[in-house]
Image (cartoon, grey):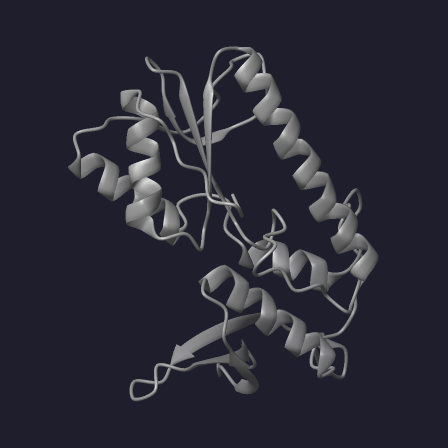
Amino acid sequence: MDLGEGRFARASVELKVLPDTRRIRAYLRWSDGGKSPARYLGQVEHETRAANLAEGWKMAWEKGLLSEEPPAEGSWASSPSVRAVMRANRSKDTRPELRLRSLLHKQGLRYRVAARPLPTLRRTADLIFSRPKVAVFVDGCFWHGCPDHLRESHKNAEFWRSKIEGNRIRDVETDRLLREAGWTVVRIWEHEDADAAAARVISAVRGSPISHPESG
């Protein structure tokens, strides 16, 4: 963000949960001369931290609190707002993934994390069970275009639509290639109930029929 007089600072979005109401507020925080000022952005109501962070970044841009700067050479992100939201959405070890892994481990299942089901295919699954050939993907609502929780951005809208549609096409292709190679693919939205998601994975690994949710 522009601090004036040619000075710039890197900003971050911080989420705070009100203890009494459990409402979540988003704040923009930055460093300035050893201090850490904060600016209230607004209330966020998404079910996941990643989506709430993305909403916080959108609010900051819409309020004019952040400044544009030329993207780094070779960067495909069209603006700092794009890169900021990308950084806010973690690609691995997200809370839904960790919860799912914990439940599966308690059931005695062992797996590899963030690995390629097919060595020759540059696609990484969140969990793989090598012997039964089961690949599990925990899809973020933001990145993969969840039909229930995706909210289109008003800024750089065309970029986001293209990016998310590209991810959807890639997901379909990945599923097809894995199934053609004899793998069972289980896709889980990050907003799904963890116990239900774990049950689907266990059914796939142990050979029982899998029930797929309509939004999965």
- On the image, the x and y values in percent for residue 140 come to 52, 50
Expressed as whole percent of the image width and height from the top left, the position of residue 159 reads 79, 53
Q: Quadrant of residue 60?
A: bottom right
- Residue under the image location 65 percent in, 26 percent down: 173
The residue lying at 45 percent from left, 74 percent from top is 15
Residue at image location 35% in from the left, 27% down from the top: 209
Q: Nearer the viewer, residue 11 or 13?
A: 13
The mark total stands at 0
Say if residue 99 shows up in the picture. no
Q: In the rendered view of the protein, which quadrant contains the N terminus?
A: bottom right
**Residue sitting nearer the eye, 168 or 216:** 216
In the drawing, does residue 119 fall left or right of residue 171? left
Above/below status of 155 relative to 164: below
Q: Nearer the viewer, residue 73 or 213?
A: 213
Asked whether, in this view, residue 150 is left or right of residue 99, the answer is right
* Residue 175, quarter of the rendered image: top right
